[in-house]
Amino acid sequence: GGGEPISEGRWAEFDRRFEEVLGGTAMGDMMRRHMDLPPPPSASGKVAGGPYSVPRAPDVAMPPWFRRDTYERFRTMDVRDDDIFLSSGVKMGTTWVARILNCLLHDIDDRGDKTDMYKNDAYPNRVGQTYPEAVPPSRDVQRREDEAGEGNAKMRGAVRRMFGDYVLDDLLDQPAPRLFSSHVFGRRLLPRGIFGDDGGGAGRGRLIVVVRNLKDALVSNHHFRGLPKDGWFGNEHGPGSLNRWVDLESCPNAFGSAFKWIRESADAVEELGPDRALVIYYEALKLNFDSELRRINAFLGLPPLTEAKAQAVAAECTADSMRSDADSRVKSIVRKGVIGDWTNFIDLDSWRRVDEAFDSSIGDVAIARPLRLFHSDDVHERIARVSDSEGEWERYWNSAYRDSNQRPV
């Protein structure tokens, strides 16, 4: 999907907004070094440098730990039929769903016992997550950079602390089925092999997309690793969390606008169809965990879930269990996980700006519609009413899945 060519004027506007928001800041300096993406598409809409060059995304800011060299290999990797790709929006439940998938795929057996793979850090993604676009591409490259002191030594240390001492080759060498977890999204950024090629080659693997209501996601992002200096509404340090969140054109947050993230993820889900793509709602997992767990298990093509395994996975994946994890990579990023926590912050008039951005950008997107309940001013009362009726949540989510051509519970 090359899409329309990007005009020089749009690139100039992107550069202007980047400097306006992040120019002169340490974060901006790091992002500038790590956002060295290839030239924009030519007039034909093709990306210069061959069919597998990294597509430029002028509306998607990359985090400071993003590595172009590793990402290029990830983008063009050979995808296998049994590969699982977890694509989750920022602060939408990535770590939680990754833990669930690991438990189902490798960590817990049918008797409910832990396997030899359980939190075995000989493999990536076993404790915390290992984003493929963050780590070095190979041990040789990692060793050369360490010995030569190339690049940003502090950033290399931070990547090891956040994602473990792994390289992309470690992810590619995972036992099958391999799990790749990332915030990159949609056809233009995920590995090309998922979708097939322009010559008609069939795509491979399965895609799992995790979605959360955008008000709670904003609150979680606002509090992630400390409060931002520019607060909610902006000051001399920047535009503020709310203003960044609702900026649909040039959102400077890592991985860009959450609204565009949902729209492009929805397009990818529709393209792949229900046999190869699954949408998981954070709220559905919170409110209907047992049913959703069986739904995920069926999508993965695993044997029917035993009661012993289901109970063991549920116990392993509670918020309390994850917050008490001995590994700081997990417990440092698991916050409250409460639905409707957004009502405890800022005023309703300010939240209307999120509603307006939602309506204008993804109001017509099928996978976004179930989120409206959790954006409502009386969210807690509405949750309580539905919860009072046995089986009502299962009916609610099944209706949502049918509307978006998804697998039901």
Image (cartoon, rainbow, N blue to C red):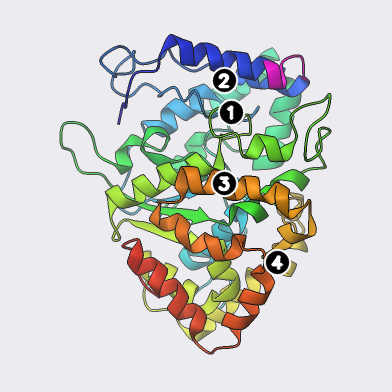
Residue indicated by mark 1: 66
* Camera-side mark, 1 or 3: 3
Label 3 SS: helix
Question: Where residue 242 appears, x then y in whole percent?
Answer: 70, 40
Q: With 405 as the anchor, is 394 left or right in this view? A: right
The amino acid type of the residue labelled 3 equals: Glu
Callout 4–callout 1 Cβ contact below 8 Å: no
> Magenta stretch: residue 24 in it?
yes
| Number of other residues with Cα within 10 Å of mark 3, as a class: few under 14, some 14 to 19, many 20 or more | few
Q: Looking at this view, is 200 or 273 the one in front?
A: 273
Q: With 45 as the anchor, is 382 left or right in this view? A: right
Q: Quadrant of residue 148?
A: top right
* Camera-side mark, 1 or 2: 2
Label 4 SS: helix
| Number of other residues with Cα within 10 Å of mark 2, as a class: few under 14, some 14 to 19, many 20 or more | some
Callout 4–callout 2 Cβ contact below 8 Å: no
Callout 1–callout 2 Cβ contact below 8 Å: yes
Q: Which residues are magenta?
A: 20-25
Callout 1–callout 3 Cβ contact below 8 Å: no
For residue 319, which numbered disc appears in the image?
4
- Residue at image coords 63%, 68%: 317
Question: Where residue 175 appears, x then y in whole percent?
Answer: 44, 53
Question: Where residue 306 appears, x then y in whole percent?
Answer: 46, 83
Q: Quadrant of residue 366?
A: bottom left
* Residue lying at the far left of the rendered structure: 200
Q: Quadrant of residue 176?
A: bottom left
Question: Where residue 190 appears, x then y in whole percent?
Answer: 41, 38
Which part of the image, by quadrant, shows the N terminus? top left
- Nearest to N terminus: mark 4 or mark 1: 1
